[in-house]
Amino acid sequence: MNGAEAIIQLLCDSGVEVCFANPGTSEMHMVAAIDGQPKMRAVLGLFEGVVTGAADGYGRMADKPAATLLHLGAGLGNGLANLHNARRAYSPVINIVGDHATYHLEFDAPLTSDIAGVAAPMSNWVGTSTSPEDLAKKGAEAFKAAMVYPGQVATLIAPANHAWDECKETAKPAIPSQPKLAEKSEVDAAVQALGKDGNTALFLGGRALREDALVQAGRIAAATGARLLCETFQTRLQRGAGRVALERLPYFGEMAADYIKDFEHIIFVGAKPPVSFFAYPDKPSFIAAEHTELLILADVHCDAEDALTRLADALDAPDEPSNIQAPMLIPAEPGRLTAAGVGSVVAELMPENAIISDEAATSGLALFPLTAGAAKHDWLNLTGGSIGQGLPVGVGAAIACPDRKVMCLQADGSAMYTLQALWTMARENLNVTTVILNNSSYAILNIELARVGVSNPGPKALSMLDLSNPTIDWVALSEGQGVPAVRVDTVEDFHTALKDALAHNGPRLVEAVIPSPGG
Amino acid sequence: MNGAEAIIQLLCDSGVEVCFANPGTSEMHMVAAIDGQPKMRAVLGLFEGVVTGAADGYGRMADKPAATLLHLGAGLGNGLANLHNARRAYSPVINIVGDHATYHLEFDAPLTSDIAGVAAPMSNWVGTSTSPEDLAKKGAEAFKAAMVYPGQVATLIAPANHAWDECKETAKPAIPSQPKLAEKSEVDAAVQALGKDGNTALFLGGRALREDALVQAGRIAAATGARLLCETFQTRLQRGAGRVALERLPYFGEMAADYIKDFEHIIFVGAKPPVSFFAYPDKPSFIAAEHTELLILADVHCDAEDALTRLADALDAPDEPSNIQAPMLIPAEPGRLTAAGVGSVVAELMPENAIISDEAATSGLALFPLTAGAAKHDWLNLTGGSIGQGLPVGVGAAIACPDRKVMCLQADGSAMYTLQALWTMARENLNVTTVILNNSSYAILNIELARVGVSNPGPKALSMLDLSNPTIDWVALSEGQGVPAVRVDTVEDFHTALKDALAHNGPRLVEAVIPSPGG
């Protein structure tokens, strides 16, 4: 057994089943070790951002980590943006990053770089093996770090000689730690706040957005009339008809501040007090009003369902939650397709138990409310704001949940960052329907340009926000990577195309041409 | 004037003419400042690896930096791999990375990250402005750092409030420092080594590979019979018929070691003693034989042409260099296209003064010798080993040299990392002909798998090195981004297609289907 075989064995023994990989020469023994391990599935991505984003999507759906296999500092660099998103999503991820053999580093060969330095900003845990035996031991530590509730990004650097040198045995799997529990004093404080006069809201995020936790939140609402809010960008929100419904905090800071300004108390579970996504001249960063009392019942690392259950019980709340979402479908206006039209049709056709990967950016603002009363589904959002997440997360979700339909609702500008994900969908025949909402623009930046105070932008500025010259042909980009695709620009054609795509048990893409911000 | 306007003015005053940009909300004032500055060209890339790779290509051809404009730590992360290559190329590059307003950082908004930490591994200089006035001052420092001979990567972090707040004036451009000069003792030592019995080689890299420096190397060869070698992966090699020809060090370590094992002395100019690109079990990292005396006449930061001129003069070398490359065209074997066939046709059709961006990987091994006697051209290579460089470097070279034809000779696997570069070629109507050598494989890894000692790899291992399922349709990926394309698989059709592509003054792509390693 060599070090590579030992760590792959350890990961399998720990329950890791999938490795999303984009290996190079320094990872060839890892490739061979995976090859020899029937319990480990290997999924090739043609760009590292696909690999790390897929691991994020897998982690969100499986609640346990996939491994990634990345090539030195530069390969890890290509994966950083989606690791940033994974870190913000609190997804469990284990990166295995190959390095040169330890004795080779002093020669500063061309691909040498400070891998630990590259890893640190986007990782909760970074380790480097010190010997072939230590490689699997560090793998166990990485697994434990990744499993810190609700999940963390762990990056393990594996020098090539530790992978290829012999070692006697693998390591023992680490036992993940239990999540923190909310303090009784915090539950008591929440009970007190909910008993007071004045508006109170529960503000939910992280694992509080799973169905069972939401039932408890709905019980609290039933007992107290508290409003149920959720963070703007959710890791994984279980929603749809029959589930406890939430109000989503608006994206723009001043709209968010206005939305919550009248609450006397806000109780946070799995989330922290919201802040403006960006800073703007003369606008506040912190959103909550001064008079609002903010109580952290359970921070993101605290067991959210436990905290909500104990709070509901302490309030003697009824078993039946309130705020149950009724089925609701808002018919699309016929004719020219818009983001709202896409939302209505998606809501109508979405199959029960679908997984939605939402990176629709400005168009997503319309999609979210229109799908609130659709069939039950999981909604995965862009947690870290680094675009290029949606398609890779769809890949990972589909690998984690092969029996469920995945739908990627994807803006065109963002999709370009990691379009190579389509190839992996084709190779693995993943059950993913992608809708590209193509407005040929970084539409959000047209809005932000004005919001930051730039008036009368000239043609050079506008050209930097424009994707229409040349127009991107998403049917070509999709079919060029093996995913059948069709382009539509009316509600009627979109309905037909989406229905057809969803009927296939494999990857399909629908390019939905919608108006650009210019009209 | 605000801070953004001040730094853009400073960069223009310093001679920076181009900004390769992929901005976000926190860079909108930079966008506006560029908009208002007629001397600064803005070139949009749809992925940051395109932006940084283009800056690398621009720097290699212009010998001065372009700016990049990147969005926070995640955006910089996406650009790291090609900054790694730029750093290894000693290209002058100035990155401007937006950050949140300074007062916003404490709130840890979703896109917040340790930008300086992300920048450090791939930057020679990192700075963060401390005020609106300091932004332009730091810009001057960044310019000076980028211009340290032959070039460096400088990364300046620009908090949004420093960009939008008022400041009274811009800063004064910094005067770049002069390159170091070789010590007289080093010239004397080289003279002595060249006078001794035994084989002696000049080993050239960096700026020693420019035409004028090579004339001096050719004079030394004429005077002493010294062999003229060059590093395997050159930043910019001026070659072709009528220029001084060099022998290229082989890629694989043991072949390289064998190649140089008989030299008694090797004199390095603009390069350091070669090492194996990767480590392999039981193979040496350091390549030179123990008996070989290694002399550093001029390290990479030392003026290469000056050192070679002084050495030639000290040797009383004749004015006329030896080792002049004769025109040479090796006809392609008709029929099924191969990498060699591509090389022969490229050599025949290459216009005078072309710029070649070579990321053809295994196929490139055939292209390089076959083009040695073609018309004069500049050859740009993958300096840092991080694939995904070729197309972006072609973009930057074309922006720097609008009157020259750029040819990207590009492997399929590598091209997938930064295929978004094609869109920028179309938008800017760049004079770039791309040849995709499509063997549907990470062919190099099939070789490396055996070289690191993995015998009998199974189907799972081989699938991680294979790009044939599904086959990538490069014509679709190119035309989907606005670059006309054609696919060929015979020498005759390739000749017709390449001739046609080169005849157009704008971007074209030829997909050259060549045999995969499996046959």
Image (spheres, coloured by chain):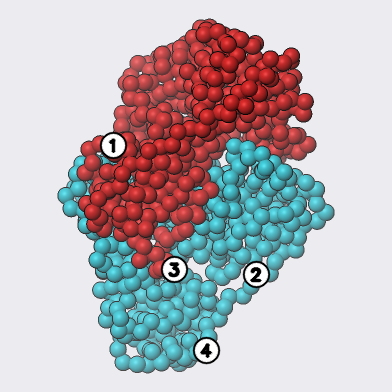
Chain colours: A cyan, B red
Secondary structure at badge 4 equals helix
User: Which residue position is annotated with label 1?
Assistant: B41
Secondary structure at badge 2 equals loop
Choose top left, top right, bottom left or bottom right for residue B201.
top right
Upstream in the sequence, badge 2 or badge 4?
A: 2
**What residue appears at the point 67 percent right and 33 percent down from the top-left corner?**
B275
* Dot 1: chain letter: B
- A174 in relation to B426, above or below: below
Q: Position of residue A232 (x, y in %)?
A: 36, 66
User: Which residue position is annotated with label 2?
Assistant: A176
Secondary structure at badge 1 equals strand
**What residue appears at the point 41 percent right and 83 percent down from the top-left corner?**
A295
- B386 in relation to A311, above or below: above
Query: In front of the other: label 2 or label 1?
Result: 1
* Dot 2: chain letter: A
Upstream in the sequence, badge 4 or badge 3?
A: 4
Query: In front of the other: label 1 or label 3?
Result: 1
- Circles 2 and 4 in contact, beta carbons < 8 Å: no
Secondary structure at badge 3 equals strand
Q: Nearer the viewer, residue B303 or B322?
A: B303
Quote the CA–CA distance across marks 2 and 1: 53 Å
On residue A238, the disc is: 3
**What residue appears at the point 64 percent right and 11 percent down from the top-left corner?**
B224
Quote the CA–CA distance across marks 1 and 4: 61 Å
